Image: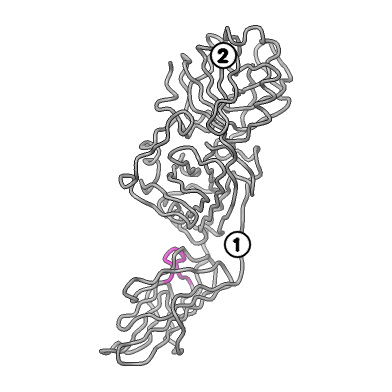
Amino acid sequence: MRRSDNVPSRWRRGPAGIAVAALALLMAACSGAAGTGGATTSGHSSSGHSGGTSAGTGGKGTAAVTITPANGARNANPSDGITVTASSGTLKNVTVHTAGDAVPGTLSPDGKTWHSQWALGVSQAYTVTATASGTSSGTVTATSAFRTLTPGQTFRTQIFEGYQQTYGVGIPIILTFSQPITNKAAVERALQLTTSNPVVGAWYWDGNQTLNFRPRDYWPAGTTVSLAAHLNGVQGGPGLYGYHTLTQTFDIGPSLIAIANTATHRTQIYYNGKLRYNWPISSGKPGDATPNGSYLTIEKGNPVQMTGPGYSLSVPWSVRFTFSGDYYHDAYWSVGQQGFQNVSHGCVNLSPADAETYYKLAVPGDPITVVNSPKAGKWDNGWTEWFLGWPQYVQGSALHEAVQAGPTGSTFVSPSTLAASTASAPLGTSPAGNAAAG
């Protein structure tokens, strides 16, 4: 049986119908600092977003400090951030005061340059105070007070995953943008992941308004994932800027993996790496074959109204895995064929007891792999992230880099520097070429 409804287009850009999409605004008075304090000397004023504010003479052994954007700037480009330079001497302290997001930064190993880590907020006032000391003089302090530009166009970002909700080990992080993004690399660089277990993965652009993150192999069960998308002030395209910081935290539940074999008419259900069930099934009949591929559970309903040529039934214990309407579901009418013959319209038919058991275990993002079907799977008919092998997936990143995430955050790395994966299919990762016709 198959549900033949019109799938909402938003499901292909992050299906908000499964869990509440979260949009978090981080707005608090804050400051960021590096080093120790010092005396105060004000610099000169200028307008615009180029140039800098300077203090000190820069003579031999004398400290000299330059701050960019300059004091008095009214339309500073937020995507440029803040740069503080000691042309002689070394920086001892940099403090940024703002009513917006905190402004962390990094001091260079030689103590000469400090730069903010993320873009600045749009339409936001900042005051930067920097102190440097020379080799034969005291300290000198420069201050720059400026304001970032107010963009003519902004984009907002939504995440599919709900706050502290639980998802399966295959779930991608799904971000959707309200406007097409052309400066994709800048958006990727603004994304920080923190995971309770070490994870290697990559970002992947599906068009210009959807960005997904998938781990190289399935998420470790029990992982807590936190995203901080520092998109406020990021230039996503000409004249187009983000205007908020998006944060979200969610959990990965136990590993629940289903393998449906259309040739043997059975499905294996693995729970936390161990075979828990081996059930008889009936999959799609000739002409309506269930397509091969490594899919993910999308939603579930008890019951779901399924309609098609010659039928309209309220079907209990239904777990969806394609947008076109393929489910694992209770098929009390085909129990006699289950284990022997494929008679469905494309779904995977289960007995009432087996369907109820699977339904109660399933959450969005649990992997379902269909094998030995004469029909190939179709990209984007469901969450098809796992149709792609790891090298293909990395190429979908604008940076063409992998992400290493862990309890202290994430960094971009060259895929060639990564240790080889030790995960094996189908329990640790998806099988290679899984969407091809059998």
Alpha carbon distance from label 2 to label 1: 49 Å
10 Å crowding of disc 1: few (<14), some (14-19), many (20+): some
Q: Which span of residues is magenta-colored?
A: 75-82
Q: Which residue is identified by label 1?
A: 26
Foreground residue among 131 and 241: 131
Left or right of residue 40: residue 134? left
The residue under the point 63% across, 21% down is: 4
* Amino acid type of the residue tagged 1 in the rendering: Leu
What SS does tag 1 mark? loop
Q: In this view, does 17 lie to the left or right of 379?
A: right
Q: Which mark is residue 375?
A: none
The single residue placed furthest to the bottom in the displayed view is: 137
Task: Please give the residue where the numbered disc 2 appears in the rendered image.
Answer: 284
On the rendered image, what quadrant is the N terminus found in?
Answer: top right
Image quadrant assignment for residue 165: top right
Q: Does the magenta stretch include residue 79?
A: yes
- Residue at image location 74% in from the left, 20% down from the top: 314
Q: How crowded is mark 2: few (under 14 residues within 10 Å), some or many (20 or more)?
A: many
Q: Position of residue 116 (x, y in %)?
A: 44, 68
Residue 357 horizontal/vertical position (percent): 68, 25
Magenta region, main secondary structure: loop
The residue lying at 43 percent from left, 16 percent from top is 438
Camera-side residue of 276 and 286: 276
Q: Mark 2: which secondary structure?
A: loop
Q: Earlier in the sequence, mark 2 or mark 1?
A: 1
Seen in the picture, residue 361 relative to 208 is either above or below; the reply is: above
